[in-house]
Amino acid sequence: MLLTRACIYISLLAGRVLSTGADTPAVESAQEQEKMPDPLTTVDFSSTLASGLHLVEFYSPLCHHCMTFAPIWEKTWKEFHKKGAQLGISMVQVNCLESGDLCKEQNVGAYPTIRLYGPSGYIKDFPITPRDQESLMRFMMAEARNENNMKLMQLESKSTLLANNQFKQFLESGVELPTLISFWPAPEAKDITKITQFRDCRHCAGFQNTWKLLSNRADAEGISTFHFSCYMNGDLCRRVGLDRLTKPMGDRDRIPALALLLPNVESPIFYERDSYDFENALDFVLRSHSNYLTPPISPEEIAKMLVTVPRVSNTAEEITGKTVIVYNPAAIATAKEASKISQTLVKQLDRMPNVYLHKFEGQLKKNIDRMLDRAYTMLLEKASKDTTGLNKDLFHLRTLSMGEPIFIMFKESSRVPIAFLKPKDQVDLSSKALQWIKENACPVLNEITDVTLKALLKRNEARQMQIVIQILDTGNEQELKNNNYMEDFFGIISKVEVTRDEYIYKELSRLYGPEIISDAASGKSGVDNNVLSHINEKLTENYNGVLYGYLDKARKKAFKRLGLNVHATQVENGDVLIVDGKGKFYYANDIHGNRMTVTSPETVIETIKALLYNKPGAAKKTLRKFLIGSPFGHRWQFLDYIHQYGFLGWLLLIITVCLSLRLPRTYKKYIQRKKYAAKHDTIGILGKERAFPE
């Protein structure tokens, strides 16, 4: 038997060796054809970069990090360079050991340094982490589609040098027009984007291009732009908290500061995001300015937003649904308090993605009715079966049952409004309003990464809502378009909301009676205030019964980082996972034990309902949960029952094993003692039991 097995293994091994040997010439030939280009030098650097976009790696052959990164760079080049040629972006290298003067000229201070260049020169740095094949390819695809990269060479900065006395006047007397100021750890210059050398500020060169684009766009929006030297005006920069930019020498990772000054707003609004790319900086400026103006929005615009389904592209763009907060200052007692709330929100809303402040013109109830009528019509035009989701009575209960609210929050693709009513205690109203926005402004759909999942779970600690995740494949855009997986997923979301609304409405009718609920929804004055308060509390408990997200299959390492032991090769585009509210377990199969997918929406909805309403039954018993972050494969999955309790679980197992090993010996000894006691007199002269002979 052993001899037979040995012969089989040897024959298989020989076949593999022979097949490898037979393929070797073809592989070597392919590798010769796919040879990477030689590193650029002083001779051809400028001419190569004169057209198109180029991702340039500055490296040293003696650098350990460069040697570690080299296989990743080479593999990415081999898989991407043909597609890159179609997109107009290439991957090139510079050997800083051989071309030291060129690297010095480009201010390269560490290896490997990866930068994006265009015809106008340096554009931006590639992020320090993560540096893997997936990140490189997504970065290049996104930048190749970014029109701003090619616009840089045609633009001149619209920014003006800001003098010391003028900035001092801005701080003391305010500004008459919206004003955007950039602060630099550099000498004064008429055009800050023309400076070629920055000391201890490796991000300054990249921000020059951002500032050039930003000053042009701000100018088009009627916003004045200035740049200010913190070297020459250290006292004023320290006054606004920018000490880090006042010293000629400092942390080389420091970044120029950006601030927006608005009329009648007491202090500058500083940009505080981690990313300093143009898109983020522009969003800060335009959204802060828009929220400051609080422009009117029509009920028709809100209706369109409620029934919109976001689209997915195969770029690195994140799907972030819009959130509109309709502000009703008429519900606030004093103009001073209304102004304070406005200023607080303008300064804080930038930290919340895609949140906009608007107002309705005219009566609030009429606007809401117009919005509902328009949304219903739009759904009928789309031949949607989800019009039942627009429960008018429930909509009114959520928004108008307790009188006119101060704010109503509407989210893109959601038909569930959230209202902020006047609290009984109106002390520090602006802080309470801000806290309410932070708790509820989470978009309907979130991209799920290890960072965002932790943030969602932290925000979800009190409510412990399920997180339903759809698997998407942005690397296969055509399949997304053909199968309309996003449409299907939002169909599921809509039906879950409808089911939850029906459940809530029935519960309210059962508790208070159908007539009282109908009177409260229509705004009749006879309903007791205590009853209205209880109704509002019940509605508040059920604003967000479920959170939703999407996980990009194209991000191959995402599953591993998230601790979901569903490998990217096993899941399909359109599959659904459900993470429990504590973030400890996930479900991959429906109530029938089959893989959950948006192409079978009814079973997904039934599974969500079985978990959502937490009712014991046959359906819920069939659901199998898997431990998030389990280190065990399918064969050893039973160990998850221990691993879920962490150190205590394993300690208990060790104690149990030790006791189990000792138990037979202890039991045997016990039997021997009993037999000995039965045959002998074990009581001594002093009345003590004699020792049992070992």
Image: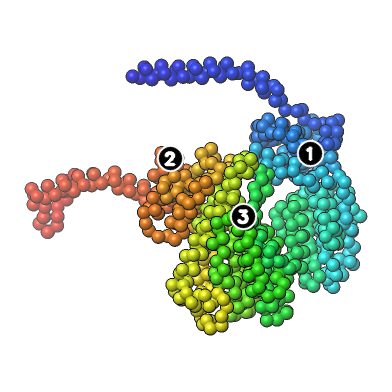
Counting from the top left corner in percent of width and height, residue 273 is at 70, 57
In contact (CB < 8 Å): disc 1 and disc 3: no
Q: Quadrant of residue 363?
A: bottom right
Quarter of the image where the N terminus is located: top left
Question: Does residue 412 appear in this view?
Answer: no
The disc, 2 or 3, on the residue closer to the chain's N-terminal end is: 3
Amino acid on which the number 3 mark rests in the picture: Lys
- Front residue of 126/61: it is 126
Q: Is residue 686 left or right of residue 154?
A: left
- Classify 416 as above or below 127: below
Amino acid on which the number 1 mark rests in the picture: Leu
Reading the image, the residue beneath label 3 is 382
Which mark is drawn over residue 506? Answer: none
Secondary structure under tag 3 reads: loop
- Front residue of 280/484: it is 484
How many neighbours does mark 1 have within 10 angstroms: few (below 14), some (14-19), or many (20 or more)?
many
- C-alpha span from label 1 to label 2: 46 Å
Reading the image, the residue beneath label 2 is 634
Which mark is drawn over residue 53? Answer: 1
Secondary structure under tag 1 reads: strand
- Classify 231 as above or below 337: above
- C-alpha span from label 1 to label 3: 42 Å
- Front residue of 360/628: it is 360
Amino acid on which the number 2 mark rests in the picture: His
- C-alpha span from label 2 to label 3: 44 Å
Q: Is residue 132 left or right of residue 271?
A: left
Question: Does residue 117 appear in this view?
Answer: yes
- Classify 348 as above or below 84: below
User: Looking at the image, how many numbered discs can be counted on the residues?
Assistant: 3
Q: Residue at x 70, y 81 (%)?
A: 334
The disc, 1 or 3, on the residue closer to the chain's N-terminal end is: 1
